[in-house]
Amino acid sequence: MKRVSAIVVAAALLLVAAVASAQSPPSPADSTATDSTAAKAPPADTTAAPAVVPAVTPAVTTPPAATPPPATPPPATTQSASGKRNDIYYGGTVGFNFWNDYMMISLEPMFAKKMKNPKMSLGGKLRYEYVHDSRYAVDYTMNNFGASVFSRYRVIPIVYAHAEYAWLSYDYPGNREGVSFLLLGGGYSKPMGKGVTGMFEVLWDVLNDPDSPYAAGEPMISVGVGVGF
């Protein structure tokens, strides 16, 4: 009887212990284990991706170039864009003189150079004259030749002043005489295109050499062309 009572008491104690165990809250360790078992998802990646920083090229500072000394200006050119000299001009004239019964026709090639002042020029000429003179009882014909030096100055673009010293050998009947002239006057020039200029010139001799075929005050008229004048 006592043995049965002891068994009943032991069973009652075990039942009470089981009920108490079922009602007590789980321990923190058990909760942690349960949560880790239930949540199978991997932890979120909390590592932030590195920010993309644009590459910055360091500025390269070029030292200033040394300033060269001022260049000496080149001398004034004496050639045009086409390669031809623009301080030289040349050409020629055809002269004529009809005065009473006296006729003279001349040919004069010329060559000249402009000075530092381009309005001024110096040059030279060769001259040939054909003369027919009927002023006297016997007509005669002469073939004369010579040379001269001259200077011109442009007063305005189309008008120039002219001074010239000339020496000519005249074929007078029976002998030949050398005659000097100092010719003063001027001319008119007109561009004709492509560097060619037409010229009309009137000169007077102020020496009046006794052997000159010209009377005092008689003009010398010539018409010609110049290239580059």
Image (cartoon, rainbow, N blue to C red):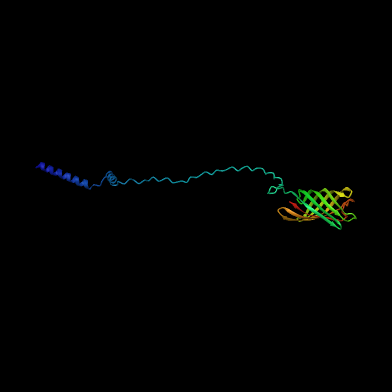
**Position of residue 17 in the picture relative to residue 208 (left or right):** left
**Position of residue 29 in the picture relative to residue 11 (left or right):** right
- In this view, the residue in front, 183 or 27, is 183
Q: Position of residue 43 (x, y in %)?
A: 34, 45
Residue sitting at the far left = 1
Q: Position of residue 125 (x, y in %)?
A: 80, 49
**Position of residue 210 in the picture relative to residue 189 (left or right):** right
Q: Position of residue 8 (x, y in %)?
A: 13, 44
Residue 34: quadrant of the picture: top left
Question: Across the whole image, how many numbered discs are drawn on residues?
Answer: 0
Which quadrant is the N terminus positioned in? top left
Residue 229 seen anywhere in this rendered image of the structure: no
Residue 226 seen anywhere in this rendered image of the structure: yes
Residue 186: quadrant of the picture: bottom right
Residue depicted at x 19% and y 45%: 18
Residue depicted at x 17% and y 44%: 14
Residue sitting at the far front = 138
Q: Position of residue 104 (x, y in %)?
A: 83, 54
- In this view, the residue in front, 115 or 70, is 115
Residue sitting at the far bottom = 100
**Position of residue 97 in the picture relative to residue 71 (left or right):** right
Residue sitting at the far top = 3
